[in-house]
Image (spheres, rainbow, N blue to C red):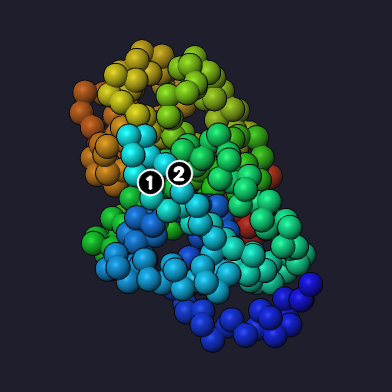
Amino acid sequence: MPTPRSPGLLSLYPHITARDRTLLHLLDDHQVLTTDQIHRLLFRARRTCQIRLGELANLGLLDRFRFARTGGGSQPWHWTLGHQGHRFQAAAHRRPEPTLRATRQAVHRLSANPHLTHLLTVNEFFVRLTTHTHHHPETHLDRWWSEALTTRQFRTITADGHGLWRVNDTTVGFFLEADTGTEPLTRVITKLDRYAQLTRRGGPRYPVLFWLGSERREEHLHRHLTDEVPCATATHTTDPAAAVWLPPGATARIPLTMLPSDHGHPVADNPNFDDDGLFVV
């Protein structure tokens, strides 16, 4: 098996652009994106996107899969890291060299993951925020953390994702709970206990955003929400950067920057601070 510094990998470097590296980094962090999501994130023309993805697949940097669509036809391509993509990211982050068998297993497990739709829904939320920044230069997504990274950094919560959203000089942190309707609402509500515990230990007090599949489910959820933990709801049909968020007890929807947000204190459970106590974006 070639090492990350062997000609087998180094020979690919002249073909990898800065945009390609961004895509490899995104797939390393967030596992899977559809053609449409990659198009909106990184490309202007869809055809250019499709051609480039095919080229990266031929180089072994990307792999892809898709399923049959109910009623005929196929779902969009789902893209993930190929073997060379895994090797490149391993070298970039000084991780052990992956074997071909391990990377093939990773693709197979991802494609068969029963939570694949949920993962794509989570990624779609952040794709929409990122796409919004392309057309509104006063906005920026300063942080897009996956469930795995959020859990590793905050340790005691298991949010679907975490972000820092900035508009001009206002920055709001948030935790995302992307709901696909597969869990009873009582179980969804119990997740708020850990967010409250995090705040009591000096961690950040960020709003928990429930992104729901329907207005009916949103209405039912509001019957159970309290004000112990700041939270707000919206549905999958909305642009999360717009004034679509409904806090408990409110009658009007507001944008993210109007939700309460506190970055917390420099304690062990709070990755927002470094050793000098300074806020780390």
Residue type at numbered disc 2: Phe
Q: Which secondary structure lies at badge 1? A: loop
Question: Which is nearer the eye, 135 or 72?
Answer: 72
Q: Position of residue 4 (x, y in %)?
A: 72, 76
State the mark number for residue 74: 1
Count neighbours of disc 1 (C-alpha within 10 A) and say few if under 14, some if 14 to 19, many if 20 or more: few
Q: Which secondary structure lies at badge 2? A: loop
* 94 left or right of 225 in image: right
Residue type at numbered disc 1: Ser
Which residue occupies the extreme front position in the image? 72
Question: Which is nearer the eye, 67 or 189?
Answer: 67
Instruction: Quadrant for residue 203, please give it.
Output: top right
Image point 35% across, 29% down: which residue? 213
State the mark number for residue 67: 2
Q: Position of residue 144 (x, y in %)?
A: 48, 53
State the mark number for residue 251: none
Answer yes or no: do the residues labelled 2 and 1 have beta carbons within 8 Å? yes
- Can residue 53 be seen? yes
Separation of disc 2 and disc 1 at Cα?
6 Å
57 w.r.t. 231: above or below: below
Quadrant of the snapshot with the N terminus: bottom right
* 100 left or right of 42 in image: right
Q: Position of residue 9 (x, y in %)?
A: 66, 79
- Can residue 168 be seen? no
Earlier along the polypeptide chain: callout 2 or callout 1? 2
Count neighbours of disc 2 (C-alpha within 10 A) and say few if under 14, some if 14 to 19, many if 20 or more: few
Question: Which is nearer the eye, 129 or 251?
Answer: 129
Image point 55% across, 30% down: which residue? 195
26 w.r.t. 15: above or below: above
* 281 left or right of 84 in image: left
182 w.r.t. 204: above or below: above
